[in-house]
């Protein structure tokens, strides 16, 4: 069975500090991977998607970047955090293109920027 | 781009009653439709998804109806119980390659004993 793991569970960071969030998918090869962001009490917005190692597409500009260094790993990062980066970050996966399956989400990382 | 409206924003029902949440969307090329449940502090749990060629799907006390003519998607929880209390999101997708889901704003469902 496929499992999706996000780390850390929660972070409290200072404005201007760097950030790195991780996501690992086990049990599925060549998944499509996604990062979503959810403001507190709000809806979800896609940030990035990746369909293969080393290839990441940006959907919205939020002074964040993403990388896919391995087939099963997706990293979200920034060198300087802003207050507006606070929220809930969710990683999701779906099978490779051609198989229509709704993305499945991880448990998320809650980020507080102070 | 695709826009999704979800209503009601808050819904309170008694245990055993049904709860209906409705979403309308704008893009007729929408490929599939999903409902997710989010409990407090947790990630999203996929409840059910349907492709655009499906009008009705039932699973474990949940019914999803899709009316493509009216561009309307609904979720019906029959015989709700307190454990169903959570935030429910509809999500629609045009492009399966990008996996981009357009979410509704969510419905906070409270099921009272």
Image (cartoon, coloured by chain):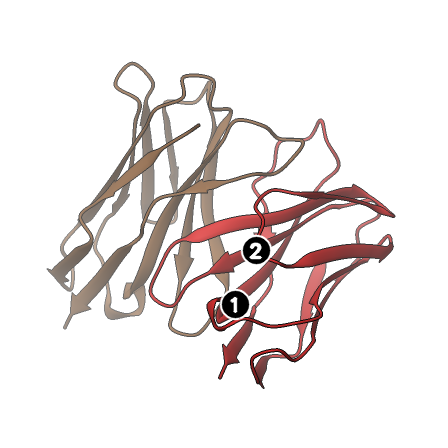
Secondary structure of the residue carrying numbered label 1: helix
When asked about the image quadrant of residue A67, the answer is bottom right
Residue A1 seen in the current view: no
Label 2: few (<14), some (14–19) or many (≥20) C-alpha neighbours in 10 Å: few
Using residue A63 as the reference point, say whether residue A113 is left or right of it. left
> Taking A11 as reference, is B14 above or below it?
above
Using residue B103 as the reference point, say whether residue B10 is left or right of it. left
The residue nearer to you, when weighing B73 against A36, is: A36
Chain identifier of the brown chain: B
For image coordinates 50% across by 68% down, the residue present is A88
Task: Pick the quarter of the image with the N terminus of chain B.
Answer: top left
> Taking A24 as reference, is B35 above or below it?
above
Residue A108 seen in the current view: yes
Q: How far from the left and from the top, in percent, is residue A85?
A: 52, 67
Chain identifier of the red chain: A
Q: Which residue is mark 1?
A: A85
1 and 2 marks in contact (CB < 8 Å): yes
Q: Which mark is residue A62?
A: 2
Label 1: few (<14), some (14–19) or many (≥20) C-alpha neighbours in 10 Å: many
Query: Mark 1 or mark 2, which has the lower sequence index?
Result: 2
Secondary structure of the residue carrying numbered label 2: loop
When asked about the image quadrant of residue A80, the answer is bottom right
Q: How far from the left and from the top, in percent, is residue A54?
A: 87, 48
Q: Check if mark 1 and mark 2 are on a common chain.
A: yes
Please give the chain letter of the residue carrying mark 1: A
Q: Which mark is residue A36?
A: none
């Amino acid at each position: 069975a496929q499992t999706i793991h996000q780390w850390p569970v929660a972070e409290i960071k200072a404005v201007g500090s760097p950030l790195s969030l991780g996501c690992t998918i086990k049990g599925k090869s060549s998944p499509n991977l996604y990062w979503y962001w959810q403001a507190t009490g709000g809806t979800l917005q896609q940030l990035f998607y990746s369909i293969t190692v080393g290839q990441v597409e940006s959907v919205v500009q939020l002074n964040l970047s993403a990388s896919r260094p391995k087939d099963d790993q997706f990293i979200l990062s920034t060198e300087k955090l802003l207050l507006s980066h606070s929220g809930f970050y969710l990683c999701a996966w779906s099978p490779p293109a051609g198989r229509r399956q709704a993305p499945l989400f991880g448990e998320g990382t809650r980020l507080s920027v102070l | 781009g695709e826009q999704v409206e979800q209503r009601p924003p808050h819904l309170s029902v008694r245990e055993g009653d049904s709860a209906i949440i409705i979403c309308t969307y704008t893009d007729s090329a929408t490929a599939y439709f999903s409902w997710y449940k989010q409990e407090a502090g947790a990630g999203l749990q996929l409840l059910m998804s349907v492709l655009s060629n499906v009008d009705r799907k039932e699973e474990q006390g949940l019914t999803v109806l899709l009316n493509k003519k009216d561009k309307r998607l609904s979720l019906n929880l029959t015989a709700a119980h307190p454990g169903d209390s959570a935030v429910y999101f509809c999500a629609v997708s045009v492009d399966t390659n990008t996996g981009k889901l357009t979410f509704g704003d969510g419905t906070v469902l409270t099921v009272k004993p």
